[in-house]
Image: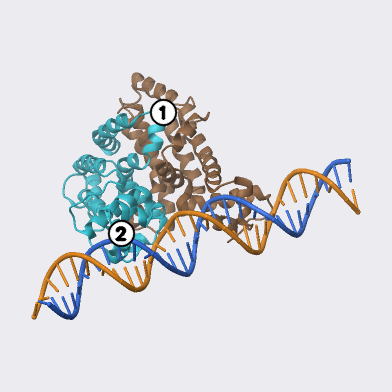
Chain colours: A cyan, B brown, C orange, D blue
Amino acid sequence: MTKTKDKNTEEQILNAAKNIFQTKGMDGSRMQEIADKAGINKAMLHYYYRSKQLLFEAVFKNAFSLLAPQLNTILNDDSSIEDKIKNFTVDYTSFMMKHPYLPKFIIQELNRNEDFIKKLKENAGFPNLKKFKEKVAEEIKLGTIKPIDADQLFVNILALNIFPFLGKPLIKAITNKDENNYKTFVNQRKTAVADFIINAIKTS
Amino acid sequence: MTKTKDKNTEEQILNAAKNIFQTKGMDGSRMQEIADKAGINKAMLHYYYRSKQLLFEAVFKNAFSLLAPQLNTILNDDSSIEDKIKNFTVDYTSFMMKHPYLPKFIIQELNRNEDFIKKLKENAGFPNLKKFKEKVAEEIKLGTIKPIDADQLFVNILALNIFPFLGKPLIKAITNKDENNYKTFVNQRKTAVADFIINAIKTS
DNA sequence: ATATAGTTTAACCACTTGGTTAACAAAGGT
DNA sequence: ACCTTTGTTAACCAAGTGGTTAAACTATAT
């Protein structure tokens, strides 16, 4: 409905496609709806992107290329585990509050087509756990954190940060929060989650 | 394709519909495909369930009625927070390993149609946090656990337990695990997650 | 046996879907 | 000016979509 003007057609289409695909998913989206939102003829979608599948892939890769760097910061920098967790939790949550559809879009579409991730894995910049694992091993040896499997720790960090954006309708219902309460709740998690994780792993 | 015989038609349809809807979602599922899997004529779907929407709702309610009791155990029993967490983590993960599509199906469809949860909320047996909150407050007062917002704790528990079933393709790719490794990984979480949470909240 | 009600099917229908086409307009180079 | 390339549109198309129908089959009661 609302069309964002003043851009060249190709970018216009990509923006509209982002909007529709990310809210409705591949299966729930219609080419006509994307064309309408872009304010152009449906044939233009095919002129620039050939098919729904290719247009979708353009949107998906674009979305994933926003998520991956978020993960890489925690994985590849040289700070302590504690700092990694603190920074990641604040940064990731702040970022996702600006792009609330991103996590569900990526998770949902990866579940729909598991082959998709294979292509992404070949890309440079795909998240790699090597350095993170070394750092965890090092800090366990130093005694600053308790023994824990690095994969488990990584998944825990991810889970605590991503889940509020995936399970929002369920959480809102169970905890009886309206949109505003929920926003406050998620904001509090920026520090609450970091504290929680650090308490769980730091040596007492 | 594979049809499970020896049941009355209505149940046959519901089983096929479960199978298709839970793997492909409402938008990605076709009535013809459900009919094929049930081994019956497509008209029978409408004979017994009137429309795709109603058939879907039958499947969804059925699925949610499996999930809700899982949550209620942790919320409504009288055991200590520590025992709640230990039991829930083992029980929930074991249950979901048998029904791996359930979490993504429910989360995805709740995101697709946020109104849906309103109907569910009216149902008796919809998860309620009252007793859990009281228990958390009590243990904080007693000093057995550190001060923490009960909603945050609840979401943390949920996140750590559910996320591995939502983000499986992503986690598998990042942690470089095949199907078998992943199964082992999730199995280890039955105790690892409980320990993690308890470490995070117990008073030192 | 025969009527009655419930069950099942093949064929059909209107509409939507992704995608194509042919004609046309705009721009750019010569 | 003229031609070629690029961008854009309305109209169209075949395949698929959820849903309906009328006829046939099955069982059960009378």
> B178 or B195: which is nearer to us?
B178
Residue at 36% from the left image edge and 21% from the top image edge:
B137
Tell me residue A71's x, y (percent).
24, 50
Tell me residue A10's x, y (percent).
23, 60
Residues under numbered marks 1 and 2 in contact, where contact means CB atoms less than 8 Å apart? no
Disc 1 vs disc 2: which is toward the camera?
Answer: 2
The alpha-carbon separation of the residues under discs 1 and 2 comes to 59 Å
Q: Taking B138 as reference, is A110 above or below it?
A: below
Among the 4 quarters of the image, the one containing residue B147: top left
**Subunit that carries the residue with mark 2:** A
Tell me residue B22's x, y (percent).
49, 50
* Residue B189 circle label: none
Q: Secondary structure at mark 1?
A: helix
Q: Which residue is mark 2?
A: A41
Q: Secondary structure at mark 2?
A: loop
A150 lies left or right of B46: left
C28 lies left or right of A11: left
> B176 or D7: which is nearer to us?
D7
Q: Count residues near mark 2 (Cα–Cα under 10 Å), then give few for <14, some for 14-19, many for 20+.
A: few
Going by the numbered disc 1, the residue's amino acid type is: Ile
Q: Which residue is mark 1?
A: B81
